[in-house]
Amino acid sequence: MKHIKDYVAKIETILEAKSNKKTKGSGLLASTKSVQSKETTDLDIVANFVQGIRTAKEEMKNGSK
């Protein structure tokens, strides 16, 4: 069970880091291009799926499509 908690914690950390990158620049000269890592790990793929599921859940709760 501890391994699952560690895995979930790693996914939460990745998602938090991604959300912090989006809100970092907010000026006229702020960069709008997101920097992608060259290697995509399995953990990144799982984090993207989790983010997609959470977004879909919020859309369902709010009644928008």
Image (cartoon, grey):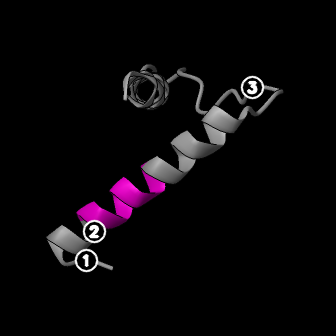
The x and y percentages for residue 20 are: 41, 23
* Furthest residue in direction front, as rendered: 1
For the magenta stretch, what is the residue range? 51-58
Labels 2 & 1 near each other (Cβ < 8 A): yes
Labels 3 & 2 near each other (Cβ < 8 A): no
In which quadrant of the rendered view does residue 39 lie?
A: top right
The quadrant the N terminus occupies is top left
In which quadrant of the rendered view does residue 19 lie?
A: top left
Q: Which residue is mark 1?
A: 64
Viewer-proximal residue among 25 and 15? 15
The x and y percentages for residue 55 are: 36, 58
Query: Which residue type carries mark 1?
Result: Ser
Query: Which residue type carries mark 2?
Result: Glu
| Label 1 CA crowd tier, 10 Å (few <14, some 14–19, many 20+) | few
The quadrant the C terminus occupies is bottom left
The x and y percentages for residue 53 are: 41, 59
The x and y percentages for residue 8 are: 41, 31
* Furthest residue in direction left, as rendered: 62
Separation of marks 2 and 1 at Cα, in angstroms: 5 Å
Main SS type for the magenta part? helix
Query: Reading the chain from its start, which is encountered first: label 2 or label 1?
Result: 2
Query: Which residue type carries mark 3?
Result: Ser
> In the rendered view, would you say 31 is above or below 54?
above
Q: Which residue is mark 2?
A: 59
Separation of marks 3 and 1 at Cα, in angstroms: 32 Å
> In the rendered view, would you say 54 is above or below 35?
below
Query: Reading the chain from its start, which is encountered first: label 3 or label 1?
Result: 3
Question: In the image, which disc is placed on residue 37?
Answer: 3
Residue positioned 42% across, 31% down in the render = 4
Left/right placement of residue 45 relative to residue 61 reads: right
